[in-house]
Amino acid sequence: MSNKFYITTPIYYPSAKPHMGHAYSSIAADVIARFKKIQGYNVFFLTGTDEHGLKIQKAAEKEKKDPKIFCDEISKNFIDLTNILDLSNNDFIRTTEERHKATAIELWKLLDKNEQIYLSKYAGWYSISDEAYYSEDEIDEIDGKKFSKSSGSSVEWMEEESFFFKLSEWQKPLLNFYEKNPDFIMPESRKNEVVNFVTSGLKDLSISRTTFKWGIPVPNNSKHIMYVWLDALTNYISATNFFENKNKFWPADLHIIGKDILRFHAIYWPAFLMAAKLPLPKQVFGHGWILSGEEKMSKSKGNILDPIELVNDYGSDELRYYLMKEVIFGLDGTINLDNFRNTINDLANNIGNLSNRIFTILDKNYDCKIPEISSGYTINENLLINLKDFINLINKYEIHNYLKKIHTYSSMLNKYVNDNEPWNKKINSEQNIKNILYSTIIGLKNIFILLYPITPKSSISFLKNLSINREDIALDLINKEFVPNQKLSKPNILFKKY
Ligand code: MSP
């Protein structure tokens, strides 16, 4: 299918309440999905929950619940989150669904058929919280307890019979693949980490467990449960029904993930797919962490800004705008409430106020219609948007710079209005005033179309007043002229100040 764009978020462990890290991954993916949509792509945007594994089994046991019933309850928090954050996802996959289990089994069978799997024994340090084994040199010992150096989570010694995937055979093909596809891992700095890791050698990967039951049984050997990461990564193809009818969306165009799960997406996942002779995703973007002070925001550290509370108090557009503007996409970023309020006040001052001022004049003096412009007049050329610049920024995933550029444009539009004073009949002819207002309305329209991926609610609400319906919002409308006399309606206050 030409012109398709398939984008995913990580699927979340539903055992914890949704936090800012989850919100961040999802919002970033939604911004790109919405941008591609208004650019004219046929977008498929997937999110979901990762419901198998020891971590979930233990959480269910703690609450004395059957794991499936437990998952049905808790995954609801993440389904709700898609509405709270105003995500435009086309599907929500749960790894406990039949469609997913069937796909994971199919992938296993393909790997087996291609002689990529063998049975052996595994012994190593296992972190339940990361659902990952670590080797001796990846472990620290503090007060007699062992921890993973990379994640800080505690590990315990485990020994079990296990199926192995011949990951070691894929070192060279992976390195070749990275070389031929220099944009596969983004941003660049993360790519170097991965290439160094693969260059230093890959061991075969244990891909089954016998010590717990909560997962997808290995075909023809149900004593074994599939390794939760093999199970989880498969979600990206199960949601497309790939094996049933070769759905047109796979391969994914972009997996958005946090940097902590890059190894799984940029090494294991392409290796599994190559080994199964399936098409590979086109890109993986590993974003940074949301920090509070110097630390990763996490429940155990008690330094949480709760995304759901922020949306309740300020609105989803406000949270989306803040995270996308203040955190450089790809790097770690610190957030706090004061900075949050300053950022959204600035949005209200810079963009909300301008819309309010212009519509007050239109409403009062022009019956809220597009003013009649002088013949041959078109939008003031300084206010023309160069769309290519904006598209380039999104193609490079520089969402923060994209927003900066909108801000610069809107400051210029404010200056244009302040310099030309469309309320001042002493310095302007009646016709001049109409022309200035006309240009400014087009400028405002441009801003709200460009803002749509980030602040969809406000953009939809503003553009509706210009008779542009939600489904008609498109980058193509940028800079486009209006029919004079077209009736508009005055927008409500779009952004509140705090
Ligand atoms: N279930 C796995 C993903 C499987 S994808 C096939 C998982 N889940 S998670 O719920 O622990 O984390 C999901 C995402 O949230 C990850 O991308 C992770 O990077 C992100 N974040 C968790 N805490 C974060 C921050 N404090 N800041 C930004 N994102 C971080 O991993």
Image (cartoon, helix red, strand yellow):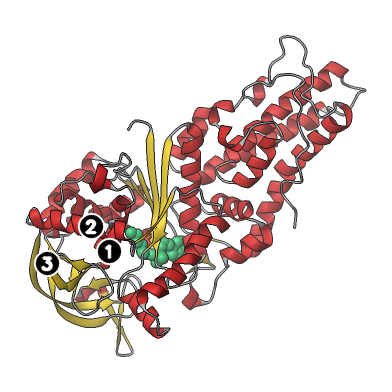
Q: Quadrant of residue 471?
A: top right
Q: Toward the viewer: 228 or 345?
A: 228
Give the mark nearer the N terminus: 1 vs 2.
1
The amino acid pointed to by label 3 is: Asn
Furthest residue to the bottom? 144
Label 1 vs 3, first from the N-terminus: 3
Circles 1, 2 touching at the beta carbon (< 8 Å): yes
The residue indicated by pointer 1 is: 229
Q: Secondary structure at mark 3?
A: loop
Amino acid residing under circle 1: Trp
At a point 68% along the width and 42% down the height, the residue shown is: 461
Q: For residue 495, say whether it is visible.
A: yes
> Across the whole image, how many numbered discs are drawn on residues?
3
Three-letter amino acid code of the residue under disc 2: Tyr
Which quadrant would the N terminus be assigned to in this image?
A: top left
The percent coordinates of residue 26 (x first, y second) are: 47, 55
Q: Marks 1 and 2, how far apart in space?
A: 9 Å
Q: Quadrant of residue 482?
A: top right
Viewer-nearest of labels 1 and 2?
A: 1
On the image, the x and y values in percent for residue 352 come to 73, 43
Label 2 secondary element:
helix
Q: Is label 1 within 8 A of ligand 1 (CB to nearest ligand atom)?
A: yes
Viewer-nearest of labels 2 and 3? 3
Q: Which residue appears at 27% of the width and 61% of the height?
A: 101
On the rendered structure, is 92 left or right of 370? left
Badge 2 or badge 3: first in the primary sequence = 3
Q: Residue at x 73, y 28 (%)?
A: 440
Q: Is mark 2 within 8 Å of ligand 1?
A: no
The span from disc 1 to disc 3 (Cα, nearest Å) is 20 Å
Q: Which mark is residue 220?
A: 3
Q: Which residue is mark 2?
A: 268
